Image (cartoon, helix red, strand yellow):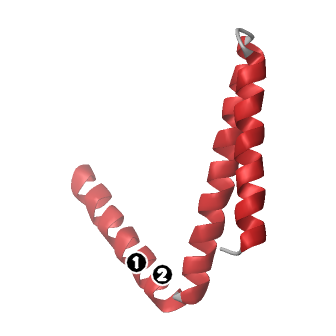
Amino acid sequence: MNRRARHSKASKVSAVRSLVRVAGHSTGLARKARFLGLAWKTMGGAKRTDEVIRSKPYQSIGVAFGLGLLLGCMIKNRES
């Protein structure tokens, strides 16, 4: 992660924290701040996942195939 990305992430986190502080007893703003924080974390996780999949595409396909096979076998056994 480069310096600019870290600074951007830090500023987003501080923005969410200040929103929560300003919200005080107001439930609506506190919920919105928590939602924004969760949304930013989710976007960060999705970006990291995308990087891993792009760096190791064949391993990602193998893992997806294995999980699909395992899930299919579990569903098939449950129906029997």
Vertical arrangement, residue 78 with respect to residue 19, above or below: below
For this orientation, the residue located farthest to the top is 25
Vertical arrangement, residue 78 with respect to residue 38, above or below: below
Vertical arrangement, residue 72 with respect to residue 36, above or below: below
Is there a contact, CB below 8 Å, between mark 2 and mark 1? yes
Vertical arrangement, residue 28 with respect to residue 39, above or below: above
In percent of width and height, residue 73 lies at 27, 65
Residue 29 visible in the snapshot: no
Q: Amino acid at mark 1?
A: Val
Q: What residue sits 40% from the left and 69% below the top?
A: 68
Of 75 and 53, nearer the camera is 53
Determine which residue is flagged by label 2.
60
In percent of width and height, residue 29 lies at 77, 20
Location of residue 6 (image quadrant) = bottom right
Q: What residue sits 27% from the left and 51% below the top?
A: 79
Of 30 and 10, nearer the camera is 10
Q: Give residue 63's mark.
A: 1
